[in-house]
Image (spheres, rainbow, N blue to C red):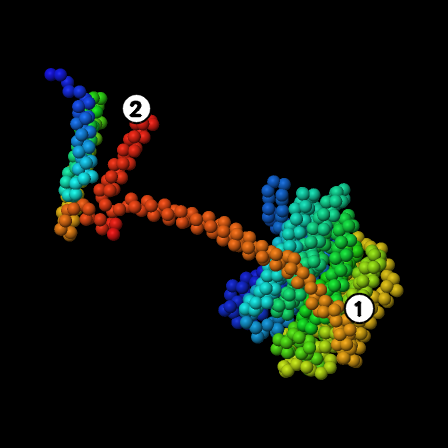
Amino acid sequence: MSEIPISWFLTLSAILFALGVAGFLFRRNIITVFMSIELMLNAVNLSFITFSYQRQQVNGHLLAFFVMVVAAAEAAVGLAIILTVFKNRGTLNIDDIDSMKN
Amino acid sequence: MQLWLIPLLPLIGFLINGIFGRRLPKAAVNLVAVGSVVLSFGWVLKTVFGLDLNTVHTEHYFTWIQSGTVNIGCDFAVDRLTAVMLLIVTGIGSLIHIYSTGYMAHEGGYYRFFAYLNLFMFFMLVLVLGASYLLLFVGWEGVGLCSYLLIGFYFDKKFATNAGNKAFIVNRIGDFGFSLAMFWIFKTFLSLDFNTVLTHVDGKDPKDLTIIGLLLLVGAAGKSAQIPLYVWLPDAMAGPTPVSALIHAATMVTAGVYMCSRSFPIYMQAPDAMNWIAIIGIATAFMAATIGMAQNDIKKVFAYSTVSQLGYMFLGVGTGAFSAGIYHLMTHAFFKALLFLGAGSVIHALSGEQDMREMGGLRTKIPWTCYTMLCASLAIAGFPFTSGYFSKEAILGAAYHHAPWMFWVGTITACMTAFYVFRAWFMTFTGKYRGHHHPHESPPSMLGPLVILAILSLGGGFFFKIPEFLGTFFPTMEAPEELSLTLIASSAGIIGILIAYLMYVVKPGIPDSIVNGIKPIYTFVYNKWYVDELYDATVVNPLVAGSRTVLWKGVDAGLIDGSVNGVGARVSNVGGLLRMMQSGNIRSYATWVLLGSVLVIAVIVGFAGGIR
């Protein structure tokens, strides 16, 4: 079985990240935006793992785990916030949530 | 000998009255103020009589400034000259403090007045005791400050605060000269101690000494109200009358004479500078006497008289008769303090009236004031065997040997002096009462000092033979007593008295006809030679106008305010633009984050060539 080149993994990571960015920028639903953030985090995780594999070092794995922990915590807190926002305002449209400005 | 006690006592008085005076009863304020000065006088007496004054008695307290070759200590020293000054300052000061308790009894700010007066005593004693030019300068500036505070004592009156400002600003010019003199002294002698400077005059460049002498003269002219800086002293009469007596007649204004006499070794080597002292002195004496003849405000008469008499002292110092200058300083302190205190008593009796045209006939109403002032008037007129006679003769004799024209001008001035003083006395005390107040004699606390000063004015020349006392201190001048000179000078005074008697008692219509006869001259003199107007036109107004248009409107409002406000406005503009970014829209923030990270990566990859 021939080895899959490193660049493939990295390209996949970049595509996933770009998709995350696009979703973050263009979607209005706050849940979707939130998922886009998760997508970006995981794209980065993939890069970490790839480089870690390439260099035969454990640091990348370590960082990936950190990111996962943070992402999990973020998901918990973030979803709680989103729930509260929805309860108070009855909307999930991110363009309507601008009370810090006004 | 604990010299530090002498100035410290008034300082303590100042602190107590200044800090707690508002809550203290008047009796306590009196006790502190008068007590501290009288104790100080007592300590001076003990010091002066307890010391061998043939040598300088110096006390070193601590090193004040130590930097490189500069080493200035806080030293006090007593020699014969200092002893004379100490006795005058604390003695007259005590009398005037006692007088003030009566004079100021009904005034507001009672404790404030005495606090300032005590502070003045402290600085004046530092000035006299200081053993270096710098310490003298500390006292010099301090008395200037107190003078300013006390001239502007009635701070709710515009003219009083203006007069205070004028005194302060004019004195700055003199102090500028004094500062330059100190720099030059330090450059020449590498020291500011009297002991070092005044014993190392030999062998120094006469040019340096002349410059030092002239610069010191500028300082002395400011403090001692000589031409061209005398203009502040007449205005200084806006202060309470005891202040005029103590600060602006007896003590502070004589500081310049003291300083010039103290620096006599420098002046002995700089005859040009000395000559200038004499010229300025005689010119001031003459000019101020002419102005004094035409004044109607009783305090203004004595103010110009003070300027004139200070001119005499400078004439004495400038002609080498240092001891005669100090002699006149002392007798002047007696009779001029008495004149001012007497004038204060008159003003007190008339509830604040100062215009002599509103007085007259007060002899029977306030006899004590009347006759004590007569003693002072006789003394200042140089009536034979009063105190002023001795000192004025000594000065005029020296002036004759220096330059005969100075003697003649001085003699004419003596005649004018006698005239204006007796004009004031006759206008105040003889004839019919022209005012509409109810004169009342002053309390004993005011009359006591008057009587003591009257005795001193008459007999002070006998009691205290300053030329003999200072004979070994100053170089002796060959000025033999010449009977003819004495006769001329003293008869000039008597003639002046007689003219005044003729004009204001025998035929009171004469002054008006004379005034009409010489209208232009009279107007010129009545308006004080238009010197204030001249200064206004040449110095004050251009300065004010320049400050207003260039410094205020141009530099301050235009440049400084402009740049500060401009920075603020530009920041505000830029902020207004940047504000657009803060839309509150999360997706636009995300776009900025994206653009920013793209930019950072582009920089890293594009310019730095990526990460290795």
Q: Nearer the viewer, residue B105 or B161?
A: B161
Element class at badge 1: helix
The x and y percentages for residue A43 are 18, 31
Any part of residue B263 in sight: yes
Q: Nearer the viewer, residue B64 or B423?
A: B423
Name which residue lies at 62% across and 48% down.
B73
Badge 1: few (under 14), some or many (20 or more) residues near its Cα, within 10 Å?
many
Q: What residue sits right under mark 2 in the picture?
A: B612
Q: What residue sits right under mark 1 in the picture?
A: B415
Badge 2: few (under 14), some or many (20 or more) residues near its Cα, within 10 Å?
few
Name which residue lies at 34% across and 48% down.
B576
The x and y percentages for residue A44 are 20, 31
For the C terminus of chain B, the quadrant is top left
Element class at badge 2: loop
The x and y percentages for residue B106 are 57, 75
Name the N-terminal-most of marks 1 and 2.
Answer: 1
The quadrant holding residue B448 is bottom right
Q: Nearer the viewer, residue A94 or B161?
A: A94
Whether pointer 1 and pointer 2 mark residues with C-beta atoms closer than 8 Å, the reply is no
For the N terminus of chain B, the quadrant is bottom right
Please give left or right for residue A62 compared with residue B133 in the image.
left
Q: Amino acid at mark 1?
A: Cys
The quadrant holding residue B348 is bottom right
- Chain ID, mark 2: B
Q: Is residue B612 above or below residue B399?
A: above
Please give left or right for residue A59 compared with residue B40 in the image.
left
Are discs 1 and 2 located on one and the same chain?
yes
